[in-house]
Image (tube, helix red, strand yellow):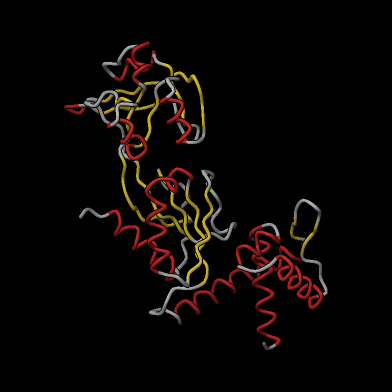
Amino acid sequence: MSAKRAELKRLAVFAAVADSGSFTAAAERLGSTKAMVSTQVRRLEAELGLPLFNRTTRRVTLTEEGRRLHQDSTPLLRQLEVVLDRAGAGGALSGTLRLTVSHDFLAGSFAPRLAAFALQHPQLLLDVVATDTVLDLVGEGIDLAIRGGTLRDSSLRAVQLARFEQWAVAAPDYLARHGLPRSPSDLAAHRWVALGLLRSPLTWTFSGRGGARRTVRMKAAARCDAPSAVRELVRAGLGVSVLMDHMVGREVAQNSLVRLLPGWTLPQVGVHAVYPATRHVPAKVRALIDFLRQQHEPA
């Protein structure tokens, strides 16, 4: 390996540590060992004569010189990725595709689709970050995110993959104790299990026949940030909540949950593939988006 190529490799390793915040995470991301990553960073620091990281037993942070190097080198490394990606267009996908998806999407229909894509591209390493937290894609070095709801960050691009209905649901034993709501306004008197991920988890607007609209403010009996946990609390009879149909359709069909007010509808939720708004979208990102869109198209 030439000296220039070695320096470029060390710079890429340095960027991985800076993006991930630890040598261990960087090694996992690069498919390498922590010892190799540490060695490459130490050699880069020796060549530059600068400390790039502050190291403690708990965390690794950039020094002022390290932040400056990271800011200056990130655009160059991304441009190099673009050049290599274009040179390899038409060939087999390779490298690492780092994506983030919520636990509930991954545990549902998304995991089989992701597995099918991975089987089609055996030379591509999928690095999946399962979290309900909205991550900084650029800062975390993430190529693609699967998110529900509206896109709030104008620096990102989004491609809609699917749309889901939202249903108000409750358990049969809860309804036996508290009564079946006949109209949206009845819900205000019920115990509500709020999904804390939502911007307004206690205010819902229902649409009915003839353009009728009813906005209802609920009172929380419990609050939870995980949709699957909200579903289980509702199934246990704690109260009423709104969840996407793909999460509760089976329970409604099996009568372990009851869909409330079927004559009224709530706004649908779009699920999007979200990625940084750069001029060039890597082939691996385009390929996964196209695959997921095809999977959701009606037969």
Residue sitting at x 74%, y 65%: 66
Q: Is residue 198 depicted above or below 178 in this figure?
A: below
Q: Residue furthest left?
A: 210
Q: Is residue 33 toward the left or the right of residue 111 in the image?
A: right
x and y percentages locating residue 169 in the rendered image? 34, 26
Residue sitting at x 22%, y 25%: 212
Q: Residue furthest bottom?
A: 2
Between 18 and 170, the one lying in front of the other is 170
Image quadrant where one finds the N terminus: bottom right
x and y percentages locating residue 147 in the rendered image? 43, 48
Q: Is residue 118 depicted above or below 112 in this figure?
A: below
x and y percentages locating residue 16 in the rendered image? 64, 65
Between 93 and 257, the one lying in front of the other is 257
Residue sitting at x 50%, y 32%: 196
Q: Based on the displayed image, in which of its 4 quarters is residue 52 positioned?
A: bottom right
x and y percentages locating residue 155 in the rendered image? 48, 56
Q: Is residue 64 toward the left or the right of residue 272 in the image?
A: right
Between 200 and 127, the one lying in front of the other is 127
Q: How many marks?
A: 0
Image quadrant where one finds the C terminus: bottom left
